[in-house]
Image (cartoon, grey):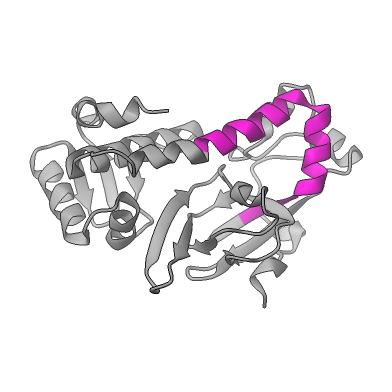
Amino acid sequence: MSATEFPRTDRSIVADDGDAYTFCSTCAFSHACLSQGMDKSQLRDLHMLVEHIGPLHAGDHVFREGDPFEAIAAVRAGTVKTYTIDRDGREHVLGFHLPGEVIGLNAIAEDRFPCNAIALDTVTLCRFSFPKISILAARLPRLQQTLFQLLSRDIGTASLLAGDWSADERMAAFLIRLSRRLAARGFSAERFQLTMSRTDIANYLRLAPETVSRVLKRFNDEGLIQVDRREVELADRKRLEDIAGAILQQP
């Protein structure tokens, strides 16, 4: 199956904590639409079709670099990694996308995806036709503003990679930002799973894998975090924020 075919689920069996009128708690656009006084039934009247995609399993691609761009997808459950492969065959991790976050916005300019997106665990998505959401955004200024905010957020993550930051600063900022993103969607801000591998984290932060493991161990030994395999608890959030302060001040 081609990556762009977006394998679909039977909508009748998709778990949903929303109902006929309200949105899922992880919906990337719920706040924008609700602020306009719109519910699901009104979106249907405007032919704003949302397709439930998945489940995709670890290693399944959502899309591949060069695929035609027709839709953006919001992660409903699971984690999606975006990455590119350079001419020498080396992988470069661009980001990790959590429930409630949107992938595919960086394809708008060229009408083709400039990177790959792959499921890191069991993933379900909500697929939004971009032409249709663009029409809706023109009618709903708050939704248009949300799209711009999502775009700027993607650009802002580059601050983790740019600059002469230390390994401690990068790792602390990564944990704090991950915590904040999860909290924004109603998940625990203090205890969470690192669904990405240490190698992927290292690639994303432009560090060696052994450096990531060493920093995490030292943070654990110093009481900043508690690590149990992939589960992390932020035991001293204030100290982590102090370490990451310079990066967290970036846009």
Quadrant of the frame with the C terminus: top left
The answer to whether 129 is drawn above or below residue 247 in the figure is below
- The magenta span reads 125-153
Q: State the count of labels.
A: 0
Q: Residue at x 38, y 56 (%)?
A: 195
Taking the spot 71% from the left edge, 30% from the top edge, the residue there is 144
In the rendered image, residue 186, in percent from the top left (x then y), is placed at 49, 34
Which residue is situated farthest in the right direction here?
A: 45
Q: Quadrant of residue 56?
A: bottom right
Comparing 163 with 47, the one in front is 163
Identify the residue at horizontal 55%, vertical 43% (top origin).
101
Q: Is residue 208 left or right of residue 1?
A: left
Queried whether the magenta region covers residue 246, the answer comes back as no
Compared with 188, 196 (above or below) is below
Say if residue 15 shows up in the picture: no
User: Residue 235: x percent and y percent?
Assistant: 21, 34
Is 226 placed above or below 12 here? above
Q: Position of residue 5 (x, y in %)?
A: 71, 69
Q: Quadrant of the N terminus?
A: bottom right
Q: Is residue 138 above or below residue 124?
A: above
Indicate whether residue 142 is drawn in magenta: yes
